[in-house]
Image (tube, helix red, strand yellow):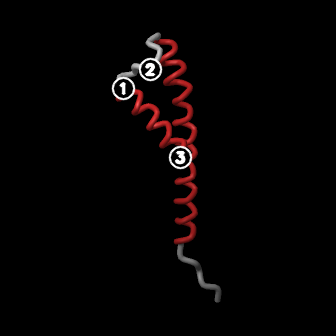
C-alpha cells in the first residue's frame, strides 16, 4: 500500500505541475515516465487484489457451517 500511495503522489504532483519537470519527448514520457513507473502501480495492485481474493476465500471457508459428528 505504501508503494501505491507513493506512486499516486508521484503522478499526481507531476500532473498538477503540468508535467513541467518531465521530458516532453513522447518516447521518454510514455516509455519511461508512464511505462516503467506504471509497473510500480500494476504489480503492487495485482498483489493487493490477489491478497484480497485469498482473504475472502479464507473467510468464506471459515464461515461455512461445520457438520456435527455423531
Instruction: Provide residue 5's location: percent of width, then percent of height.
Output: 48, 43
Crowding at label 1, few (<14), some or many (≥20) Cα neighbours within 10 Å?
few
Q: Which residue is mark 1?
A: 17
Nearer to us: label 3 or label 1: 1
Residue for badge 2: 21
The answer to the question of whether label 3 and label 2 lie on touching residues, with beta carbons closer than 8 A, is: no
Task: Name the mark on residue 31.
Answer: none
Q: CA distance from mark 3 to mark 1?
A: 23 Å
The residue at 53%/53% (across/down) is 53
User: What number is the disc on residue 2?
Assistant: 3
Disc 3 packing (10 Å; few <14; some 14–19; many ≥20): few
Q: In the orientation shown, which residue stands out farthest toward the bottom?
A: 70
* C-alpha gap between disc 3 and disc 2: 23 Å
Q: Residue at x 54, y 48 (%)?
A: 48
Q: Are marks 1 and 2 in contact (CB under 8 Å)?
A: yes
* Residue 14 falls left or right of residue 37: left
The local secondary structure at tag 3 comes to helix
Amino acid at each position: 500500500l505504501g508503494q501505491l500511495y507513493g506512486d499516486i503522489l508521484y503522478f499526481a504532483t507531476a500532473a498538477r505541475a503540468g508535467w513541467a519537470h518531465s521530458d516532453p519527448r513522447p518516447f521518454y514520457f510514455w516509455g519511461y515516465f508512464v511505462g516503467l513507473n506504471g509497473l510500480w502501480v500494476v504489480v503492487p495492485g495485482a498483489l493487493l487484489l490477489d491478497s484480497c481474493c485469498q482473504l475472502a476465500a479464507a473467510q468464506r471457508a471459515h464461515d461455512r457451517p461445520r457438520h456435527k459428528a455423531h
